[in-house]
Image: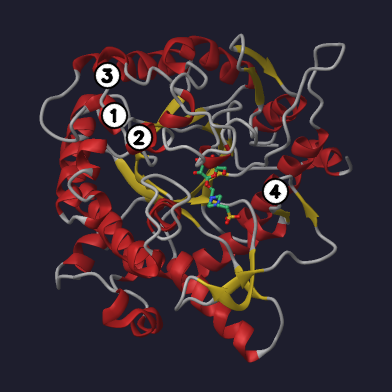
Amino acid sequence: AALIDLVGEIRFPRDFIFGSATAAYQIEGAMALDGKGESIWDRFTRRPGVIVDGSNGDLACDHYHLYPRDIALMKEMGLRAYRFSLSWPRLLPQGSGRLNQKGAAFYDRLIDSLLAEGIEPFVTLYHWDLPQALQEKGGWYNRDTCMRFADYAAQAAALFGDRVTKWTTLNEPWTFCWFGHALGEDAPGLADGVKGGVAASHHALLAHGLAVPMIRAEARGAEVGITLDLNVTEPATDREEDIAAAARFDGAQNRWYLEAIFRGVYPEDMLDLYGERYLPRIEAEDLKAISAPIDFLGINNYRRSVIKAGVDLPPLNFERVSPPGSDYTPLGWEIWPQAIEDILIEVNDKYKPASIYITENGMATTQETPDERGRIEDFGRADYYAGYIAKVASAIEKGVPVKGYFAWTLMDNFEWALGYTAPFGLVHVDFETQERRLKLSGEIFGRIAREAPGR
Ligand code: GBH
């Protein structure tokens, strides 16, 4: 528990924002309430065997009803911002067309309640819950989904843009495109290999690019960005084939998105690698739209990637390596605080984003139960936060324009294919009673949030 001792020394600029993050499907519940339409996660979780504990997000944290309690917990920790996502099918049950007024009213209540407590809303438009109606038409394989997304973005900006200034288009296109379309582990459960991952990625990026000017047009003064899950990628050895495999993996996960957004090109080496066999139709003007200037880059970071040559996802042909001697979370994710400073410095050096938010960082444990004093003393998680946040502070000292940090996640929730087996929360949720309880990590994170800025 040595890293926790750092807490009193961590320093941030006075205007630095600490917040927590969630996503609609992981917390809201109210799956079919008040006119909400079906999403691909509502559909996918009904397939036998795809979620380890057979669960789903039908009820989740029932945040749809319990949001005042959840806001009170953020307030108790002293958080200045809350990053959450809108459920596209809650607002537009068919993906486009008629607006569901009751869905809009829920987000009105949520946003107004946050503002009343002095907590700034950071809205994400898409955190993986595509309307099932759009999936029926091809989902992220269909260019038309890009236009539907831009329309949805415009409607959301018109509804909430009088109160929300921070807008994020997509959360982690790499994850939902590849785990949902190449590997079949996430919704919509397609295992189409690299061809699927790349096609979905191009359309997701185009959707982002088309949405950016729509949001600006509808929400005066909006700051618009995208969240990418970026990992520094290191070859497992200095053998040539491992160095090449690491470059391919870095190209697929990081550079494909960064180069398109910041430079308006796809990386030459990846275009060569994919070739006609794996690439979708890319129109001349697509990259111009994708590279629409953004106000901030959101980075989700949990670890680094150590890669060697292997057989996964041809022609990427890589294998992920777990370096010996490191500590790992129960999910097998390496605990490596330097990873967050390294990715911040690398992205800043190469792409010079106007500003950066860490939009997610945190760790899973196995399931936790309160001790005899009713406490959850998750020292490991508190340590993880102290260690990683200290490295964010170090990146700022070196000139990286990081403006805020969001812990993943506010409260234990539905962790996608892992169901309720991998809690990440600062707050414990008893899913029998929906009782919430601040963990030790929540107390420590709250102390950092209240005391570190301006120290
Ligand atoms: C984020 O994804 C999500 O935005 C968030 O919704 C989620 O709850 C949170 O992280 C915690 O997982 O082959 O070992 O990489 C993080 C990126 C990429 C992590 C896919 C899980 C699959 C297992 N995710 N990855 S692995």
- Of callouts 3 and 1, which one flags the residue occurring earlier in the amino acid sequence? 1
Task: Give the labeled residue for mark 4.
Answer: 388
**For residue 43, which numbered disc appears in the image?**
2
Position above or below: 330 against 292: above
> In front: mark 2 or mark 1?
2
- Of callouts 4 and 2, which one flags the residue occurring earlier in the amino acid sequence? 2
Task: Give the labeled residue for mark 1.
Answer: 38
Amino acid type of disc 4?
Tyr
Alpha-carbon span between mark 2 and mark 3 = 19 Å
Task: Give the labeled residue for mark 3.
Answer: 103
Amino acid type of disc 2?
Arg
How many residues crowd around disc 1 within 10 Å: few (fewer than 14), some, or many (20 or more)?
many
- Of callouts 4 and 3, which one flags the residue occurring earlier in the amino acid sequence? 3
The C terminus: image quadrant: top right
Query: Quick one: 358 or 353, which is closer to the camera?
Result: 358
Alpha-carbon span between mark 4 and mark 3 = 36 Å
- Of callouts 2 and 1, which one flags the residue occurring earlier in the amino acid sequence? 1
Are the residues at dot 3 and dot 1 in contact (C-beta closer than 8 Å)? no
